[in-house]
Amino acid sequence: MARKFFFAFQYLLKNPPWDTGITPPEVYQFLEENSPGIALDLGCGTGTNALTIAEYGWKVTGIDFVPQAIWRARRKARQAGLADRVKFRVGDVLDLSFLEGKQDLVLDIGCFHSFSGIDIERYAGNVLKHLSPGGSLLLYAHTKRDPKSSHGVSEEDINMLGQFLTLINRQDGVDGTSRPSAWLQFRMEVTD
């Protein structure tokens, strides 16, 4: 509950530091290299990335648990003339029971690294359930410099996803505050 309050409060202040309004180049690169399909943006915030994906011809669902963020995202979609291509929903990324069908792309910029324990397993289960064969998980996460740190994903967390998905690409770096981070692209293999 405190976590939800923190995030909601940040959106009341105007623009949280993580909601930059800029789609990262890694997302553009993915869109330029892949044909349009159906996408899911986990923790979509005010919809910047979901709208970019929709501009490339994709059908997109964005989900965030902060109502103020979703309200802004819906307004931005209407203003951009993309309300028919992108739908936004208030909800928990750990409960995707509302979602129908498979997704060709699941985008996560900053959700996965906030989970621990059983929630990591729930997250992975949701991604596996909803990702189409041949589909991609494009994930940006803070990584743990110190294994005892409470924030960020560990190599064990990344390897857990790699048990079910094929790691296609990994780019390690740091964010704007010098925290270690990584862009990861996984693919759901097609099975016969």
Image: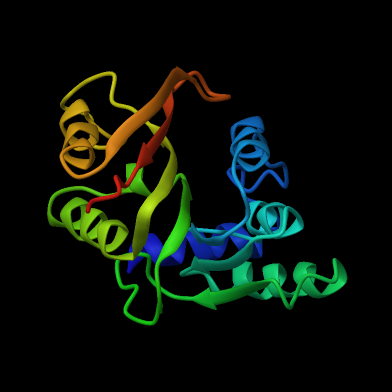
Q: Is residue 167 above or below residue 133?
A: above
Give the image location of residue 64, x and y in percent.
Answer: 49, 66
Give above or below for 33 relative to 114. Answer: above
**Above-or-below relation of 139 to 155:** below
Image coordinates of residue 130 in percent, x first then y, are 34, 65
Using residue 105 as the reference point, say whether residue 113 is left or right of it: left
Residue 187 sits in which quadrant?
top left
Residue at (19% x, 45% y) in the render? 164
Residue nearest the observer in this picture, 150 or 154: 154
Decide which of 141, 160 is in the foreground and name it.
Answer: 160
Location of residue 110 by image quarter: top left
From the top left corner, tell me how far across and down residue 113 is, in percent. 34, 42
Residue at the farthest front position: 192
Which corner quadrant holds the N terminus?
bottom left
Which residue is at the far bottom?
A: 98
Q: Position of residue 134 (x, y in %)?
A: 39, 49
What residue is at 53 percent from the left and 23 percent from the top? 177
Query: For the point 59% across and 74% down, which residue is it?
Result: 88
Residue at horizontal 69%, vertical 54%? 48
The scheme the figure's colours follow is rainbow
Q: Is residue 151 left or right of residue 125?
A: right
